[in-house]
Amino acid sequence: MALKIANKLSLHHHKQIAYKFLNHNNFLMVAGFCVEPNRFQSNTFSIRYFIQPLYIKFDYIDLSLGDVIGEWEYTEIDTSLDEICRVYNDKLSHLNSIIDVVNAVLNCQIRFYGSSVARTELFAYSYLVLNEYAQAIPFLTTLITLNDDDNKEWYSPIISSATHICKLIQHNNYAEVSDIMLLWQSYTRGKLGV
């Protein structure tokens, strides 16, 4: 099904996702659709649209940013494609850059279902990609303060990354910040296969 979506909308395709890249100075986000076969009814599937920054280290497709489009039976592929095209035109086609996504989230044009921590990471690292260091610092600081949270062990990698990036910014090591985030991006791309 993802291949049919990719062909219909001229998107890239990998396994159960159809997507396009949003690029800013070699940093990438993916915006597209994820097809999820129903585990309980083998003749149905659901589709979500999603947007995911690749420069935030992740092992899987993160569905925090986006929404469910619907669920269909495999005999309703044409109906589902019509709805997917409508959602693409309404939600994704106008997103051509990372700043477009940041603004869409800020203006509540795209729903963010993830945790407040994931939202903070989105803004912190997206502002870094956009070279808006002054705007990134408050978000990084919020991530660092997770060290005071009762569940700080859970947030340990997030705290560590934010602390390291913040120190690099304080010492004007912007190139190293970019290098680290490009490594994260390479890792995430490898895990997602995009």
Image (cartoon, grey):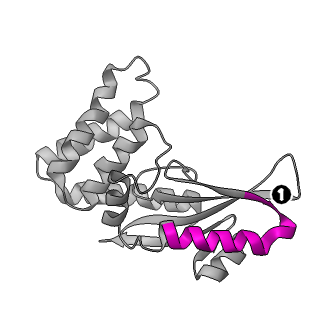
Number of marks present in the image shown: 1
Which of the image's four quarters has the C terminus? bottom right
Residue 96 on image: x %, y % = 39, 73
Q: Is residue 119 magenta?
A: no
At x 64%, y 69%, the residue is: 84
Q: Nearer the viewer, residue 177 or 124?
A: 124
As displayed, is residue 28 above or below residue 110? below
Write down the residue under mark 1.
44
Question: Which image quadrant for residue 104?
Answer: bottom left
Residue 19 on image: x %, y % = 56, 70
Left or right of 73, for residue 30:
left
As displayed, is residue 69 above or below residue 120? below
Q: Is residue 80 magenta?
A: yes
Residue range corresponding to the magenta coloring = 71-90
At x 28%, y 60%, the residue is: 129
Considering every residue shown, the one lying at the far left of the view is 171
Q: Secondary structure at mark 1?
A: strand
Amino acid of disc 1: Thr
Question: Which image quadrant for residue 6?
Answer: bottom right
Tag 1: Cα neighbours inside 10 Å, few (<14), some, or many (≥20)? some
Q: Nearer the viewer, residue 22 or 9?
A: 9
As displayed, is residue 42 above or below residue 153? below
Residue 21 can be seen in this image? yes
Which of the image's four quarters has the N terminus? bottom right
